[in-house]
Image (cartoon, rainbow, N blue to C red):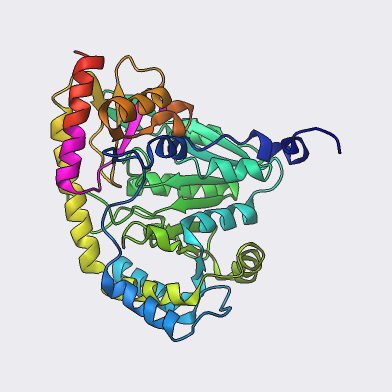
Amino acid sequence: MKNQSHLLSITRPAQAEPDSGIVKAAMYGFGRPGVIPLWAGEGNLPTPEAFCKPAAESLLKGETFYTWQRGIPELREALARYHTRHFGRDFSSENFFVTGGGMQAIQTAIQMIAGEDDEVIIPSPAWPNYAGPLRLQGSRPIEVPMEFRNGKWSLDFDRLFAAITPRTRAICLNSPSNPLGWTASRDDLIAIRDVCRKHDIWMFGDEVYSRFYYGAKNEARAPSFLDVCDVEERLLLANTFSKNWAMTGWRVGWLQAPRELGPVIERIIQYNTSGTAAFLQRGCVAALDNGDEFIAMQVTRALANRDLVVNFLREFPQIRFEVPTGAFYMFFKIEGMTDSAATARRLIDEAGVGFAPGSAFGADGEGFMRMCYLRDPAQLQEALNRFGQWLKTNHPK
């Protein structure tokens, strides 16, 4: 047998794909006594018992066999009811497809619309789990930098639309944004819609954080492509049960798509996972039908924590940030910091606080750190105190 690395025999995209900067920071600090973990995109509350009980009952009753590749009818109907309730118009269960988390919804969309050397445009900084799957299948993520100027993030639409080429298959928009907390307005969504229609390309939306929205008019959700688009046009929306209903470990999400794509999506799900466990889906039905009060509590908690973080960071002139209007992250710049990954490790070692490095979200995120603030308020305050002391020592005014 030749003495050579097995890595040389796998595909070039698999060889070249970098590790997730978020995961690397988390694994560096994972399990260390006393470290406060604010690196991951999840809250600290467990899934409510009311959502768990139907799943447990289903499991104990023996609902453990293969099931509908598109998702059980009861869950798809519950998704239609949920959207009808929150968008004020009728939705059909035929437009919803249950996936193994929001990540499989994203992968399914990518596998449908982007092939070898095809391009998908992504405003950046962005969650790395759009660009990674594209690269792994030979497609090209085209990252368009957003601008951070005078304490505000903005998306230059002239620059965004100038990135469209004959190879462009979609514009991917995450709003509210992970990691920025920036939220697209209705007019922003109309502008993207009109250009996508003009060029006959897909709108690919990630609206996972749509309920975590802190608009001036106390809206229950952020502006959505569903406010300005028909569900049967070239629109794909990825979503998940992870954030709203505190179900990150369940790994159940959904893809909303034109019903014509149903057989294609069904095939992709079959080849990738052969469906999502039926007993898990029973719990998701309960979450959709009975979870609005829990979501409202989570959003209220997130908003209070956001304000706690904002008021604290304003005491440090070396910190720059925009007050986020959505999601549950603070993305902040430390003046003079040039290596966010190294800084994340130092904060774990020296302050016992875990943040995600801005470089994990693309080159345009370097110089920033991401903090998840959907945590226990007392724990969050302790993390801020530790971080503040570290700043005074390492990055004085």
Q: Is residue 165 above or below residue 274?
A: above
Viewer-proximal residue among 95 and 375: 375
* Residues shaded magenta: 365-384
Question: On the rendered image, what quadrant is the N terminus found in?
Answer: top right
Question: On the rendered image, what quadrant is the C terminus found in?
Answer: top left
> Which image quadrant for residue 321?
top left
Place of residue 69 in the rendered image (x, y in percent of width and height, measured from the top left): 58, 73
Residue drawn at (56%, 78%) of the image: 68
Can the viewer see residue 169 in this picture?
no
> Which image quadrant for residue 281?
bottom left
User: Does residue 178 belong to the magenta stretch?
Assistant: no
Place of residue 172 in the rendered image (x, y in percent of width and height, measured from the top left): 50, 46
Residue drawn at (33%, 30%) of the image: 348
Residue drawn at (50%, 38%) of the image: 20
Q: Is residue 276 above or below residue 237?
A: below
Place of residue 289 in the rendered image (x, y in percent of width and height, measured from the top left): 31, 75
User: So how many labels did they put on this image?
Assistant: 0
Viewer-proximal residue among 312 and 303: 312
Place of residue 29 in the rendered image (x, y in percent of width and height, measured from the top left): 37, 36
User: Does residue 367 belong to the magenta stretch?
Assistant: yes
Q: Seen in the image, is 87 located left or right of residue 122?
A: left
Can the viewer see residue 14 in this picture?
yes
